[in-house]
Structure formats: C-alpha cells, structure tokens
Amino acid sequence: MGKPRFAERIKWKAFALRLMIEDRHNRAFDDKHRVETAREVALEAAGVGVADVRRGNTRYRATWERLIRRAIEGLDIDYSRHTFVDYGSGKGKAMFVAADYPFQRIVGVEYAPHLHAIARRNCETFQSDAQQCFRLETVCGDVIDYELPAGPVVCFMCNPFDQATLTSVFDAWRERCAAGERDLRILYLNMRNIREIEAVLAAQTWLRVEARDSQFVAFAPNEAAAERQADLLAA
C-alpha cells in the first residue's frame, strides 16, 4: 500500500507544480484577449448547491489553451458545418479558443451561476485578431437537461463531471445518435490523464476513436453500432 500512495502523492505534487507554471500562460491569455478565465473558483462559492458540488468535481479550473487547440485540431471535420458546445464551460476559456476556428456557432453550458455570469461578461469584452466564429452563446443550466441543437455538433469537455454525470451525458448523446443525428464528434480532455475516467470511456462501444493521446480523446459514432441501436429503438 505504501508505494501506490507515495506514487499518488508524487503525481499530485507534480500536477500542482504544473498548474503553477500554466497559471502564467492562463493569465497571459486573459491579458491578451481582455477576459478573466484564469482564477480558480470553488463551485460552492460560485453558487452551486452543496449537494451538486461533487457532480462538477468541486472546483473551476481554466483549461490550458494549447491542450484545447491540440484537441480541436485533432478533428477531421469541416468546422464551418459544426456547432461547438462546451459542456461545463466555466468562464468560457474553451469557447474563446474555439472562436479562432470557423465553427458555425459556439455554445457554453454551465450550471454555476457565478461562472456563467463571468462568461457572459467575458463574451462582451473578448478580443482576438484570429477570431473566425462570432456567434458565442452562454447557457446557464444543468447539462443533464440540455438538448443539443440539430445538425453537426462538436461536444467538448475537460474533466467537468463525476462519473455518474458523465455517464448520463454519454447516454444522452448515444440516444441522439440512435435517433438519427449521427454527425457528432466528442472531445474529452483531462489535464492530468484521461485514464482517470477510462472505465466510462471504454464503455462507449457505440463510438470509435479518431485521435487520442494521454490528455485528450476524440470520438465519432461507430456507424454499425449506431445502426444496431436504432434498430433496437424501432423494434
């Protein structure tokens, strides 16, 4: 037991050091684009009820810009046909990075009222010389209740939920795909390692992996699996 615990402590200390280094990049991003996304916030302090804090992994933390870009650029799609939806969008960091790509529109869904309010203000002040998408929308609500828009969609998330919530979100996407809306891409990111949620990801047999490294995975529907699911629903 001693060695695994020691290894776990070392892992978290290394991640804490990495966060300190990345914080400088996060603040530089904010200064450049006239937004405030860098500062961490406990979800309870952001207006989330105590019973729901753990569903959102307890804390808002800005996702690293270069990781967001690596994931988006791992997609083999025509961006202009797709709506980009950030599940657990926090203060809007991923939305602003995604705006440098020619998505049809960008939507951020966030259940913490304080974070949502900051994201709305950020949308008003955001500036980027490279911006290609200008339709940025923020939604304050629970991702469990959120209904994706029709048409091609990229669903983005950076380790925003506990396993139960994440499973429910994947189930909703699977049902949408089975109902015929199959032009779907899913980006799951984790600034530590996506293996932390491997049990949930491995259960998504209706999806195929398009790109993957230690910090992100890009999924697309497995057409054969989607057709079987659709047949079951129609029976």
Image (spheres, rainbow, N blue to C red):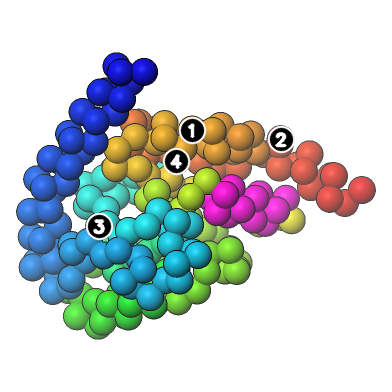
Residue shown at the point (29%, 28%) measured from the top left? 8
CA gap, disc 2 to disc 3? 37 Å
Verify whether residue 174 appears in magenta.
yes
CA gap, disc 1 to disc 3? 22 Å
Inspect the image, locate mark 3, and give the three-letter code of the amino acid beneath it.
Ala
Comes first in the chain, label 1 or label 4: 1
Q: Is label 3 in a helix, a strand or a loop?
A: loop
Residue 198, label in figure: 1
Q: Is label 2 in a helix, a strand or a loop?
A: helix
Comes first in the chain, label 2 or label 3: 3
Comes first in the chain, label 4 or label 3: 3
Q: Nearer the viewer, residue 232 or 103?
A: 232
| Overall secondary structure of the magenta section | helix
Inspect the image, locate mark 2, and give the three-letter code of the amino acid beneath it.
Ala
User: With respect to residue 205, does 184 lie above or below?
Assistant: below
Give coordinates of residue 199: x percent, y percent: 54, 33
Mark 2 or mark 3, whichever is nearer to me: 3
Inspect the image, locate mark 4, and give the three-letter code of the amino acid beneath it.
Ala
The N terminus lies in quadrant: top left
Taking the image as shown, residue 202 lies to the left or right of residue 114, namely right
Give coordinates of residue 202: x percent, y percent: 56, 32
Q: Is label 1 in a helix, a strand or a loop?
A: helix
CA gap, disc 4 to disc 3? 20 Å
- For disc 2, the marked residue is 224
Inspect the image, locate mark 1, and give the three-letter code of the amino acid beneath it.
Glu
Mark 2 or mark 4, whichever is nearer to me: 4
CA gap, disc 1 to disc 4? 14 Å
| Residue extending farthest right | 235
Q: Is label 4 in a helix, a strand or a loop?
A: strand
Verify whether residue 24 appears in magenta.
no
- For disc 3, the marked residue is 62
Residue 218, label in figure: 4
